Amino acid sequence: MAETWNKKEREKKKKQERKEKAEKKQERKENSSGDTSLESMLMYLDENGNFTSKPPDPRKKIVVNVEDIQIGVPKHEPTNPEDLIRKGVVTFFNDAKGYGFIKDTETQESVFVHINALSEAIKENNMVTFEVEMGPKGASATNVKLLK
């Protein structure tokens, strides 16, 4: 049975690829440093989280007690409800739009307040007590009550 021209070309190509592969293998053998010890294969992690080939400095070693390691979320300690109640001054309130801002007297931060969180009507410069709740857009006041 006669071989076709295409079949001969494929066999030549395969033979050439095998030859090139053998040459590359031989070249890798010749260029390898020959150092296959464990020390040459080790990588270290420095204090900044970068990989390095040098071992860490033993003088910078930090001793950690096993008891101090916390795995997972730390236990939630119950908070005193009185600590959550804050005092503040209404800096801005728009009755038509139904929102405003309260400035906390302790932290001096401005907290958003919506009309739905009010127990009674408020106006600007009123002293109020409120609780802070974190919403999707940041802190917002809840349970807002006028101080008398």
Image: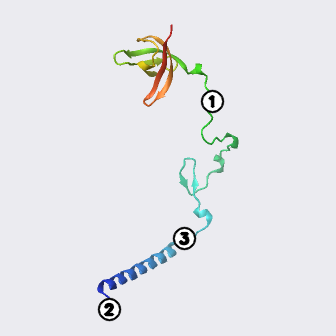
Ranked by sequence position, the earlier of labels 1 and 2 is: 2
Circle nearer the viewer, 2 or 3: 2
Q: Residue 147: x and y, percent?
A: 50, 10
Visible residue check, residue 108: no
Q: Name the residue under label 3.
A: 33
Tell me how many marks there are.
3
In the rendered structure, which amino acid carries the disc numbered 3? Ser
**Within 10 Å of the Cα at label 1, are there few (<14), some (14-19), or many (20+) other Cα atoms?**
few
Front one among 50 and 18: 18
Residue at the outermost left position: 5
Q: In which quarter of the image is the N terminus?
A: bottom left
Considering the numbered disc 1 on the image, is that residue within a helix, a strand or a loop? Answer: loop
Ranked by sequence position, the earlier of labels 3 and 1 is: 3
Query: Is 118 above or below relative to 54?
Result: above
**Within 10 Å of the Cα at label 3, are there few (<14), some (14-19), or many (20+) other Cα atoms?**
few
Rounded to the nearest whole Å, what is the CA distance between mark 1 and mark 2?
Answer: 87 Å
In the rendered structure, which amino acid carries the disc numbered 2? Ala
Q: Name the residue under label 1.
A: 77
**Within 10 Å of the Cα at label 2, are there few (<14), some (14-19), or many (20+) other Cα atoms?**
few
Considering the numbered disc 3 on the image, is that residue within a helix, a strand or a loop? Answer: loop
Query: Is 89 above or below relative to 36?
Result: above
Q: Name the residue under label 2.
A: 2
